[in-house]
Image: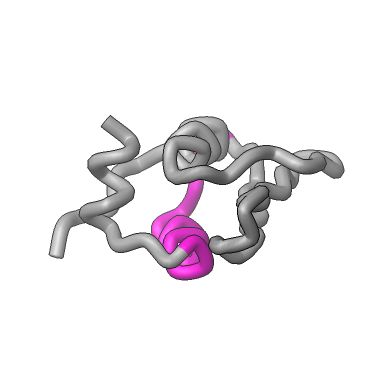
Amino acid sequence: MSKLPVVSGLECIRALEKVGYTVVRQKGSHVRLKDMNGKLPPVTVPDHKELRPGLLRKILKDADLTVEQFIQLYK
């Protein structure tokens, strides 16, 4: 299993957009992403400077992505 990279909320959002998510709304620092095709579940990502490992792991679980898949999208 690969180690989680240290990413910001914005970097995480950009990686999720490559999978098919689009930003639908933002309230404060939390950004809500949704798949317009309805195939992927909605995900909320805080626009923080650095996402903690547990939170990033939860976001990946909600988006149905593995750490390896996320690393490929993040690059």
Q: Is residue 56 covered in magenta? A: yes
Q: Position of residue 30 (x, y in %)?
A: 74, 46
Q: Position of residue 9 (x, y in %)?
A: 55, 39
Q: Position of residue 60 (x, y in %)?
A: 43, 60
**x 44%, y 44%: residue:** 19
Q: Is residue 19 above or below residue 66?
A: above
Please give the count of numbered marks on the rendered protein: 0
Relative side of 42 to 29, left or right: left
**x 30%, y 62%: residue:** 66
Name the quadrant of the C terminus: top left
Main SS, magenta residues: helix
Relative side of 55 to 42, left or right: left
Q: Nearer the viewer, residue 57 or 34?
A: 34
Picture colour scheme: one colour
Give the extent of the magenta segment: 49-63
Q: Is residue 24 covered in magenta? A: no
Q: Position of residue 5 (x, y in %)?
A: 29, 44
Q: Residue furthest left?
A: 1
Q: Quadrant of residue 49?
A: top right
Relative side of 52 to 26, left or right: left
Name the quadrant of the N terminus: bottom left
Relative side of 59 to 26, left or right: left
**x 16%, y 57%: residue:** 2
Q: Residue furthest front?
A: 37
Q: Is residue 64 above or below residue 32?
A: below
**x 76%, y 42%: residue:** 24
